[in-house]
Amino acid sequence: MNPDQLTTILLFAGFNEVTLPEGARLLDVHVDGYQVSLAFKTSASAPSVYRQFYVAFNSAPTDYTQGVLRLIKKIDFADGTSTAMIYEVYPYDEEV
């Protein structure tokens, strides 16, 4: 049995496509200025899959052509001037 690992990815405003081990579970979200980091619990032996995330600052997404968006977390900045919204993007399934 392989032990779990921690994988961190950095996201920037807009669409971000990343490779993660299949079944990666989100543990933590951190925003530092306009940089977002997501920490995942992963298994080293799992095959890799592509996942897409979308980061919006002070606005909702306007381009839905990439897929269906699921809000992961909304973070209000401490000074009250900005909001970060982090979404996971799921491709449209045209056969449904």
Image (spheres, helix red, strand yellow):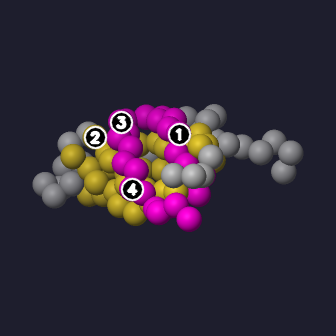
Which element type, helix, strand or loop, lies under badge 2?
strand
Single out the residue that lies furthest toward the front: 1
Mark 4 belongs to which amino acid?
Leu
Span shown in magenta: 1-26
Which residue is at a point 49% across and 56% down the rendered structure image? 42
Q: Is residue 36 left or right of residue 44?
A: left
Which residue is at a point 38% across and 44% down the rendered structure image? 9
The residue under label 2 is 35
Tag 2 or tag 4, which sits nearer the N-term? 4
The residue under label 3 is 12
Tag 2 or tag 1, which sits nearer the N-term? 1
* Mark 1 neighbour density, 10 Å: few (under 14) some (14–19) many (20 or more): few
Choose between 73 and 8: the one closer to the eye.
8
Mark 1 belongs to which amino acid?
Thr
Single out the residue that lies furthest toward the right: 95
The residue under label 1 is 19
Q: Quadrant of residue 56?
A: top left
Residue 4 numbered mark, or none: none
Which element type, helix, strand or loop, lies under badge 4?
strand
